[in-house]
Image (spheres, rainbow, N blue to C red):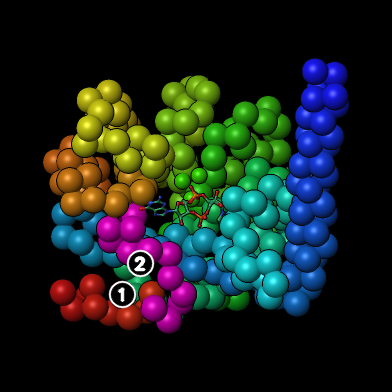
Amino acid sequence: AKAEGRNRFQFFDRSLDAAARRRNLIEQELRTAVANESLTMNFQPLVDSGDGQVLCVESLLRWNHATLGAISPAEFIPIAEDVGLIEQIGAWVIRQGCMTAAAWPETVRIAVNLSPRQFGGTGLYASIAAALRDSGLPPSRLELEVTESLLLKTDTLVESTLTAIKALGVRIALDDFGTGYSSLSYLRKYRFDKLKIDQSFISDIESNRDSRAIVSAIIALGRDLGISLAAEGVETEGQYKILQTLGCSELQGYLIGRPMPSDELSSFLTSRAAA
Ligand code: C2E
Ligand code: CA
Ligand code: CA
Ligand code: CA
């Protein structure tokens, strides 16, 4: 039994080692990727649940490594946050997003994901203002997706930065809504323009009455507060119909369109506009 215990520890050590090694490798390769500008962006549409027109497009980072293959942002973003690369990556995403969106029809907004770590100084505000100026994109066509983890910070810098960004005319969306800790108090403190209901509530909305009740309540709340509502992760016709009936104004998910490269998105916008 003793030997077995030791083996188990060895196994544990080795797997920990493998995870640490992959992390180090990703960190190194990410530095190179950022320096070489080899990260790319995909774009996923959000449509009006009523008429199917594209209202907004979310940018999602992609990294296709020569030998490691596609690395998920869910893996490399947290590493970028830890090693201080997120400010640079984030500023690039904002700039690239605004430049790309400036070529879209003026009814289509761009949504960009922000990491809480980007709120560390005055850099974020400056990079947003510069991206808007240089791209010529009207501020009302830029939407920033933040998560509750940002609002957990009791930092006055977060509050003042959000206020300054909003004053530019940029929209703020609260992402992954429903998965956090005390969402409702944040709704009083900050004026969000949009709530994005987390896909974990959408995935079982057809089979789970509780999920349906929660989503219905969130939509009613948004309506009463004058905040627009979006649902992410819509994969089936059934989910689409339920959300439409409940009055969720914007829908996003594989059913409507997967995250796609910029040129594919342009064709998607053209075909939807003609439809
Ligand atoms: P998120 O912002 O919650 O993005 C939604 C994720 O769900 C995306 O994963 C998207 O590809 C995926 N998704 C979209 N529709 C469906 C669907 O119908 N079904 C399912 N199962 N999934 C769907 P992705 O692209 O892997 O991104 C993962 C996370 O990485 C994002 O979650 C976001 O937190 C982060 N991320 C991505 N790009 C950026 C970025 O530019 N900056 C920052 N800070 N974070 C980013
Ligand atoms: Ca998002
Ligand atoms: Ca989300
Ligand atoms: Ca998420």
Where does the image place residue 13, in percent across and percent down from the top left?
83, 36
Where does the image place residue 216, in percent across and percent down from the top left?
24, 30
Q: Residue 103 got which mark? A: none
Badge 2, how many Cα within 10 Å: few under 14, some, many 20+?
Answer: many
Where does the image place residue 130, in percent across and percent down from the top left?
64, 68
Q: Quadrant of residue 152?
A: top right
Q: Quadrant of the C terminus?
A: bottom left
Residue interval drawn in magenta: 252-264
Q: Is residue 233 magenta?
A: no
Q: Is residue 257 magenta?
A: yes
Q: Nearer the viewer, residue 174 or 137?
A: 174
Magenta segment's dominant SS is loop
For disc 1, the marked residue is 269
Q: CA distance from mark 1 to mark 2?
A: 9 Å
Q: Nearer the viewer, residue 261 or 226?
A: 261
Q: Looking at the image, can residue 78 be seen?
A: yes
Task: Say what amino acid the circle numbered 2 marks.
Answer: Val
Q: Nearer the viewer, mark 1 or mark 2?
A: 1
Furthest residue to the top? 1
Q: What is the secondary structure assignment of the residue under circle 2?
A: loop
Q: Looking at the image, can residue 244 be seen?
A: no
For disc 2, the marked residue is 108
Badge 1, how many Cα within 10 Å: few under 14, some, many 20+?
Answer: some
